[in-house]
Amino acid sequence: MYGLYINAFLPGSFAVAFQVGRPDPQLSLFSDIEQPKTVEPETVIDEVMECFEILESGKPELLKERIDDENYYESFVGLAKQIAPDGDAVKLVGFKSLKNGEERPIALRKSREQLRGNVHLTAVAEDEKAVRESLKGTLMYASTPLRRSKLGTVKLIQSETGTPFLIKVPIALMKDVVQPYYEERVAVTVYQKGKKLFLDEIVPES
């Protein structure tokens, strides 16, 4: 319901300014449809900033308490890992919000590797019997089941051997985190439980 706008690239830096728009008033015209409670854009920004602070604090249990909806939690963690510095070429990713003339800065210094040990996209990672593996290959094929399900499936063709691997992916991540990599070479971290693989992280193959 919220528009996201890029205002300007700031000269001489990698900084960019974003603005969150208000919900589309056209949605309220459909009076026969129950409308969700309207949340002001400022509140949305505050919530995102606070969740970034918790993520940087290294207390994943607090983040899970804050985002009690499983789909939203998985989506936030998946996108946050994409945003986090790689620890090599990029050491810090900073955010700064402006509200009522006051600035609020937040710096993400934990690398993707550091976050990997603290927050997971799949509960399988917390299972002692699950085995963590790394795979590289081309991401091919995706299936999102029509029936209510928490998991979709993608296929990874391994670079060295051409072996196909079917990987379970939380539905919340299929569009925003996984889909941009279709037919691209990627490196993935998965957890294996029994014969099934569950996605925990996906990045471009270096």
Image (cartoon, rainbow, N blue to C red):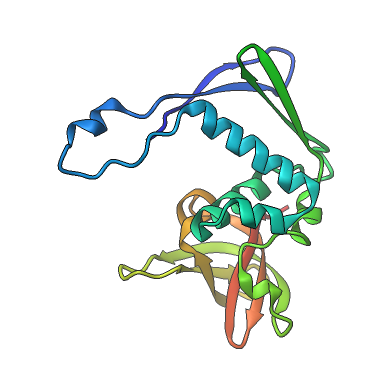
**In the image, farthest residue toward the left:** 32
| Nearest to the observer: residue 16 or residue 164 | 16
User: Along the line of sight, which residue is nearer the eye, 70 or 180?
Assistant: 70
Residue 152: x %, y % from top left: 45, 68
Q: Residue at x 70, y 74 (%)?
A: 126
Does residue 34 show up? yes
Q: Residue furthest bottom?
A: 194
Q: Horizontal placement of 71 versus 56: left or right?
A: left
Residue 7: where, in percent of width, then height? 53, 17
Task: Please give left or right for residue 176 compared with residue 57 in the image.
Answer: left
Q: How many marks?
A: 0
Q: Is residue 91 above or below residue 169?
A: above
* Picture quarter with the N terminus: top left
**Residue 198 image-quadrant placement:** bottom right
Q: Is residue 163 visible?
A: no
Tell me the residue at 52%/60% (across/down).
70
